[in-house]
Amino acid sequence: MTEPNTTPISPKVKRPLVLLTGATGYIGSRLLPLVEQRNVRVRCLARTPDKLRPQAAESTEIAEGDVLDRHSLDAALTGVTTAYYLVHLMASSSDFEKQDREAAENFRAAAKKARVQRIIYLGGLGEEADPKLSAHLRSRHKVGKILRASGVETVEFRASVVIGNGSLSFDLIRSLTNRLPVMICPRWLATPTQPIAVADVLDYLLKALDLPAGESQVFEIGSSDVVTYGQLIREYARQRKLRRWLFSVPLLTPYLSSLWLGLVTPATAEVGRHLIEGLRNPTIVRDKKALDVFSIRPVGYRQAIEQALNESYKEGAG
Ligand SMILES: NC(=O)c1ccc[n+]([C@@H]2O[C@H](COP(=O)([O-])OP(=O)(O)OC[C@H]3O[C@@H](n4cnc5c(N)ncnc54)[C@H](OP(=O)(O)O)[C@@H]3O)[C@@H](O)[C@H]2O)c1
């Protein structure tokens, strides 16, 4: 078992520079304060620096840039030791796969040029060989492959639903359950998934900073519970004390269900549709290597939902 090296860095040694992309997003915004507490210098890449400034520590640099603009990446990656890639382009274009690819290629080239030592990326679970893999999950895998091809050591984590207040995929489940007492759902109600609490995802992302240098690796991460989306919905309803009836209708296609889901969920129709298409794909941890390499033991889905609800009560969401 390889425990991360947490030896403190001598003050005489120049502290490593960590670049965070996606710092305005769900995962990135939660990771930012945790990275800021480490003995490192922090730089964020943001399309709209003003949006990020209030959330960032004074010492954190903000580089204005866009992953689709290679030139801005060259500047942002200069001097960087470790770079987090926490970006997806589902919201920006209907051809998000092409844009995801372009963005990853830009990042790969700039990281290589800047001699970055490690890229840490959070992607998605799902069977690589599944011909019916949704475009979203396929694109997440492709991005990992492109980053690895940089020759820069890439640590890729693959997760399914990240359970937390504000997480796109969890919000989809929450809005559905909050708003619809009776749900007519397609087959995806029975699709198995292995969700993970956001706190555990952040723990993995942070500990990846301390891994000893080595080869690129892919870590599949999830709680110990394999559940169906139906079970997730029922458990959420149970904890919220909501009475819900779920009916499975095999003929309702993911496309049709995305249309009605669009009416009840806060995600934009475009993003919601891409996520929903992925609900038909099992997202299960097959390779359990993460449990050997890290000492993290993710909480089960019930506790993860409880944590998300507590967080949402604190933040005034419901
Ligand atoms: N949430 C989940 O349940 C979940 C599950 C598994 C994996 N993941 C993975 O985790 C990563 C982060 O996801 P998230 O949930 O945090 O997503 P998110 O909340 O939608 O945030 C996306 C981030 O990407 C940034 N971005 C988008 N287009 C950009 C561009 N052209 N240039 C620079 N930045 C750009 C956004 O910045 P702006 O503020 O400028 O738009 C935002 O900070 C993704 O790789 C995702 O696949 C998430």
Image: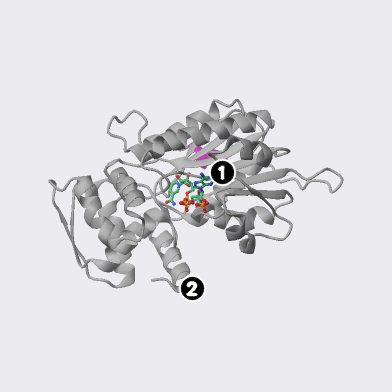
Q: How many marks?
A: 2
Q: Is residue 16 visible?
A: yes
The amino acid at mark 1 is Asp
| Displayed quadrant of residue 300 | bottom left
Give residue 108's mark. none
Question: 34 or 293, which is in the foreground?
Answer: 34
Residue 195 x/y as whole percent: 39, 50
Residue 15 x/y as whole percent: 78, 45
Judged left or right of residue 259, residue 225 is right
Mark 1 lies within 8 Å of ligand 1 (Cβ measured): yes
Residue 292 within the magenta-colored segment of the rendering: yes
Residue 56 x/y as whole percent: 65, 59
Question: 157 or 119, which is in the foreground?
Answer: 119
Residue 315 x/y as whole percent: 48, 71
**Quadrant into which the N terminus falls:** top right
Q: In the image, which residues are magenta?
A: 289-293
Tag 1 residue: 66
State how far apart marks 2 and 1 are (Cα): 33 Å
Does the magenta stretch mainly form a helix, a strand or a loop?
helix
Sequence-earlier tag: 2 or 1: 1
Residue 93 within the magenta-colored segment of the rendering: no
Tag 2 residue: 314
Q: Is residue 60 above or below residue 145?
A: below
Question: 199 or 176, which is in the foreground?
Answer: 176
Mark 2 lies within 8 Å of ligand 1 (Cβ measured): no
| Displayed quadrant of residue 158 | top left
Tag in front: 2 or 1? 1
